[in-house]
Image (cartoon, coloured by chain):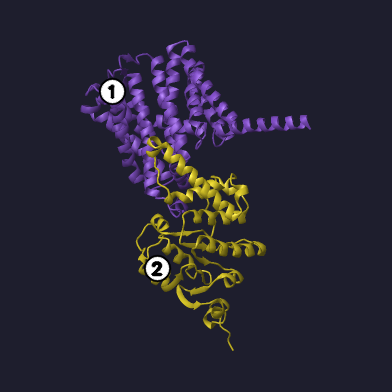
Chain colours: A yellow, B purple
Amino acid sequence: MAILELKDVTKKFGGLTAVDGVCLKVEENQICALIGPNGAGKTTVFNMITGAYQVSSGDVVFNGESICGKKSHEIVEWGIARTFQNIRLFKSATVLENVMTGFHCKTKTGMINVIFQPGKCRREEEETRQKSLEILRFLGLEGVKDSEAGSIPYGHQRLLEIGRALATAPKLLLLDEPAAGMNSQEKKELVETIRKIRDTYHLAVLLVEHDMELVMGISENITVINFGRRIADGSAEEIQHNNDVIEAYLGRSDD
Amino acid sequence: MANTKNKKLLMILILAAIIIIIPVLTPNMYIMQIINMICIYIILGTSINVLTGFTGQLSLGQAAFFGIGAYTAALLNTRAGLQFIPCMIGSVLLTALFGVVLAVPALKVKGSYLALLTMGFGEVVRIVMINWTPVTNGTAGILGIESPVFFGFAFDTLKKYYFLIMIFVIAGIVYQNVILHTRTGRALIAIREDNEAAELTGINVTTYKIRAFVLSAVYCGVAGCLYAMMIKYVSPDTFTNNVSSVILWTAIVGGFGTVLGPILGGVIMQVLPEALRFLGDWRLVVYGAILLVVILRFPGGLYPYIEKFIENRKAKKGAAGAAGRG
């Protein structure tokens, strides 16, 4: 069953159609990629999935139910988490606190419980801490758990963002250019990490990425969009030999 | 483990001893009044710390909540003849309500616009205090508020009242510290750090901003009630924009976003103007200059610097000890 399905999704900003009737399917446990030249509308698609933008027409179906019109934080609760192209951590909080913040929608105690049920709060807090440490251990970030999130190396910050997203227990993880700014060694490790995340946490991954080697190496299904329209969809092999895709990226040959 | 627990217990005992000994050592009522005002400003500093320091929502209208708290207590006491506890509950409930009232428009703006909005709120409340004469008695204010009495024991002197305030100061600081290390506190900090990222991490930014406003307002409400029942008189000129800025400065000087910063700020902001009285007319000039130096020299407030200083000394001691052994 498809965990996420975009049905003819269109987004208009005034007179500009940023995304025009895009269809996209992500199966459970699948790693998919959404690619396209700069300005093709990839990030707009992400923003519609996460509820930051409302779709102008069409439907976004997650886990069999429409999530159009839902608020961003509700969509996170439903099971879609994302990372950002330009890292957006809670910089002055510690690494551990960043991940613990991700557990927000899976925990309950509020401002009043603290007074009347301190034991319950302490238990929940301890549980959150342990689960967060588990995620940090999984990502190899345990050594920097008490550092300020903004002070750790760039590659670690990217991983930490994934960690924070994992804390919300997503069924679908959206990665917005996860390899941006990484060297080739780090990229190789990232591919391994993404696969490991999929297998350990049993979730589907949809990523936007410009690094074709990474995309081709990891994706089980690739959707290509250009000027807001879907121009191709299929396996890495199919995409590499698709004339429309070659034209979109390299231009048409004149002879 | 046992060692750290013992140390903690020792610290608490020392702190308790200091708190109890302060009024005993205080020579006169003038200084006792200043100490009580410090305590009230610690609560007020904590109120803005929750809202601005942790949640990142700048407020220049805290005096309004302070005033609403004080007037509610004053009215419930003088008109309805209610005792301290029901007055306090009334102050808390009404300021909480006004916290929501201010939060609703505040959700739509940020930065300097939020500062203007909150400042406007402060002015509106003050003007209502002046002009709603049948209820607030206008500029004359409300006289004849009674001291709190518990089971025949009256908190009728400043020294006795000090202990009553202290209960709320301690409860307020402890609650702030506890809440900071729960999911609520993390949500507030997430909102300060990155509004959108917080929303996309599953935090309902709208409700948590409202909660921050309400919590902040309630702290002011408690301070207001304590103030009204200590001074036994409230009037509109106690709750001006000037007071809002002193509250803001209390948190800035102490250190925004730190749990103990407001204590430091409260002491400095109350003691400094009194200590400078010998300067006569030059008092406010010097006062302003000192504050400017403090924020230029210690951006982020004094508390983080003191913390760092202590840590460095500890580290040096540790290093020296290790070298000595080696």
Res A61 visible: yes
Q: Which corner quadrant holds the N terminus of chain A? A: bottom left
Q: Of B265 and A146, which appears nearest the observer?
A: A146
| Label 2 secondary element | strand
| Label 1 secondary element | loop
The numbered disc on residue A11 is: 2
Q: Which tag is nearer the camera, tag 2 or tag 1?
A: 2
Chain under callout 2: A
Q: Of A6 and A244, which appears nearest the observer?
A: A6
Estimate the x, y position of residue B259 in percent, counting from the top left.
49, 34
Q: Of A181 and A138, which appears nearest the observer?
A: A138
Q: Are marks 2 and 1 on the same chain?
A: no
The numbered disc on residue A54 is: none
Q: Which corner quadrant holds the C terminus of chain A? A: bottom right
Answer with the quarter of the image where residue B188 lies: top left
The numbered disc on residue B141 is: 1
Establish if A224 lies above or below B67. below
What residue appears at the point 35 percent right and 27 percent down from the top-left corner? B224
The three-letter amino acid code for the residue at tag 1 is Gly
Q: Is residue B311 left or right of residue B221?
A: right
Chain under callout 1: B
Estimate the x, y position of residue B301 in percent, counting from the top left.
54, 34
Estimate the x, y position of residue B157 in percent, counting from the top left.
37, 13
The three-letter amino acid code for the residue at tag 2 is Lys
